[in-house]
Image: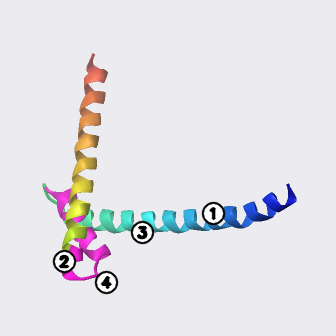
Amino acid sequence: SFAYRDSLLPQSTQTGMNKQKAGKSFGEDGALFAGIECVTEGVINPVTAGFVAGGVLARNSRPKAALHGGLAFVAFSAAIDLFLQREQTVSVRLFYL
């Protein structure tokens, strides 16, 4: 029992540190996306912001990796935007029923 507790403590500490790092990274990525989306006011905000944010996040890699990062972020932001629009439409329909 004592040996199990000694091996569990370092693992839980490492897990907590990983969670904090992941949360900070997610917050920075979200702030970057939101800032770019505010600057690129227009019809295609999420797509433009997603491409630029993905490219900026992969800027330390090769140009091809930055392009792929931008395209992946575009796909992700477009999927979330479509999902939120669908949810909003469903909630409006339910409101008027």
Residue at the spot of label 3: 28
Could you classify mark 1 by the number of other residues whose Cα lies within 10 Å: few (under 14), some (14-19), or many (20 or more)?
Answer: few
Residue at the spot of label 2: 64
Residue type of the residue flagged with mark 1: Gly
Q: Residue furthest left?
A: 43
Give the label, 2 or 1, closer to the camera.
2
Residue at the spot of label 4: 60
In the image, residue 21 lies at what x, y percent? 53, 69
In the image, residue 61 lies at what x, y percent? 28, 82
28 sits left or right of 71 in the view: right
Judging depth in this view, the residue of 42 and 78 nearest the camera is: 78
Q: Is residue 48 magenta?
A: yes
Label 1 near label 2: C-beta < 8 Å? no
Judging depth in this view, the residue of 83 and 69 nearest the camera is: 69
Mark toward the start of the polypeptide (1 vs 3): 1
Determine the image quadrant of residue 31: bottom left
How far, Cα to Cα, is label 4 from label 1? 27 Å
Q: Is residue 38 magenta?
A: no
Give the label, 4 or 2, closer to the camera.
2
How far, Cα to Cα, is label 1 from label 3? 19 Å
Residue shown at the point (21%, 69%) measured from the top left: 68
Could you classify mark 2 by the number of other residues whose Cα lies within 10 Å: few (under 14), some (14-19), or many (20 or more)?
Answer: few
Label 3 near label 2: C-beta < 8 Å? no
87 sits left or right of 51 in the view: right
Residue 16 marker: 1
Residue shown at the point (56%, 66%) measured from the top left: 18
